[in-house]
Image: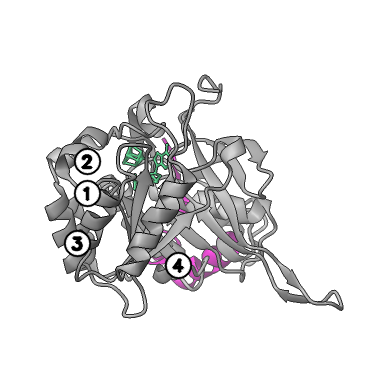
Amino acid sequence: MKKSILDFTKDELADIVKPSFRSKQLYHWIYQKYANSYEEMKNIPKDIREDLSENYILNPLEIVKIEESLDGSKKYLFKLHDGYTMESVLLPMKNKKIDEDGKIISLTKYSICVSSQVGCKIGCAFCLTAKEGFKRNLTSGEIVAQVLEIKKDNDIAQNRRVNIVYMGMGEPLDNMTNLVKAIEIFKDEEGLAIGARRQTISTSGLSSQIEKLGKMDLGVLLAISLHAVDDELREKLMPINKAYNIDSVISAVKNFPIDARKRVMFEYLVMKDLNDGLKSAKKLVKLLHGIKAKVNLIYFNPYPNSPFQRPDEKDMLEFKEYLNTHGVICTIRQSKGLDISAACGQLKEKIDNDYS
Ligand code: SAH
Ligand code: SF4
């Protein structure tokens, strides 16, 4: 299969196109001017353009379907070159503010939720992505293209920064090499210029990989999908806990370098009668002792035939209150895109909706 030009860092491109300043020009065309073909890149000599177009795909993704939610989020179904499909979601986080005279005070802020694999090997009991098994890792270019295509499709100007959350399909730390390269490509000032602090990696808790990522000291933010406070329940929900138990995850987090102004996010998926009680909240406070943490409570998002239930609002609020009054910052995540199955854990790679 042909490689994509998006698979390369600027330094790597410098080995492909000579002299080296051409890699800068290429980056400008691709990531800042949103070029759709090599022909457009007029300041690059024709023979180089022809060579590139013969050897490297400019866009590795094809948009197959876009669904828009009532809350403004948009789910993209992308087709890959080998026919597999995967999804990404555009999430408007804060809406545009306009003053009384109609002047724009601040523009909409966006997060883009990207996938890292087609399917997932981890097999969490509550997750729809897991149901389809694992197909393959995404290449760096396929990860990068999700953001690029979504920015283009929504006319989000090159200099408008977006946040990236690696919370789509797949386990990012199970595709570490391609992930790290994608982070580098995103960061490039000549490219999309999305700094590491705007990139959050969500992981089911592969402790050894968290340690490895920490040692690279990239400056990225970390989110841990914890979901349970004792190993017995966590093992049932997330089989990965057999290999990496709660203690090992907590100790990996303690070793992870975090910007002094930032916190590690702990995601806690709340399921009715399973982990929604104050006993769990108490244990969670103990577990997080000594960590600069922030807890995000997530309502379980049901799908047809899912074995778990959404918790009661009252229990969610009590849980949150307990954490907040015991020194742990906690918020309840307002899931976006529920009506189009774009919310957490609802992404899957099939085109036909056999779950809905
Ligand atoms: N594999 C990574 C990132 C993708 S999952 C991880 O597990 O962290 C992104 C988030 O969605 C995780 O916190 C995951 O636990 C959560 N999630 C999965 N299924 C869900 C569901 N049915 N309802 C709500 N959140 C879910
Ligand atoms: Fe994979 Fe994350 Fe889903 Fe678990 S929750 S199966 S790790 S995508």
- Horizontal side of 324 relative to 150 (left or right) equals left
Mark nearer the N terminus (2 vs 1): 1
Camera-side mark, 2 or 4: 2
Does the CB distance between marks 2 and 4 fall below 8 Å?
no
Does the CB distance between marks 2 and 1 fall below 8 Å?
yes
Mark nearer the N terminus (3 vs 4): 4
**Residue that badge 2 annotates:** 234
- Horizontal side of 293 relative to 34 (left or right) equals left
Q: Is residue 6 magenta?
A: yes
Mark nearer the N terminus (4 vs 1): 4
* Type of amino acid at the residue the image marks with label 2: Arg
Spatial CA distance of label 4 from label 1 is 28 Å
Q: State whether residue 262 is above or below residue 80.
A: below
Residue drawn at (53%, 52%) of the image: 334
Camera-side mark, 3 or 4: 3
**Residue that badge 3 annotates:** 286
Which quadrant of the figure has residue 186? Answer: bottom left
- Examine the rendering and report whether any part of residue 15 can be seen: no
Residue drawn at (45%, 37%) of the image: 310
**Residue that badge 1 annotates:** 229
Q: Secondary structure at mark 3?
A: helix
* Type of amino acid at the residue the image marks with label 3: Lys
Q: State whether residue 249 is above or below residue 1.
A: below
- Examine the rendering and report whether any part of residue 217 can be seen: yes
Spatial CA distance of label 3 from label 4 is 29 Å
Does the CB distance between marks 3 and 2 fall below 8 Å?
no
Q: Secondary structure at mark 2?
A: helix
Range covered by the magenta-colored residues: 1-30
* Type of amino acid at the residue the image marks with label 1: Val
- Percent x, y of residue 120: 33, 35
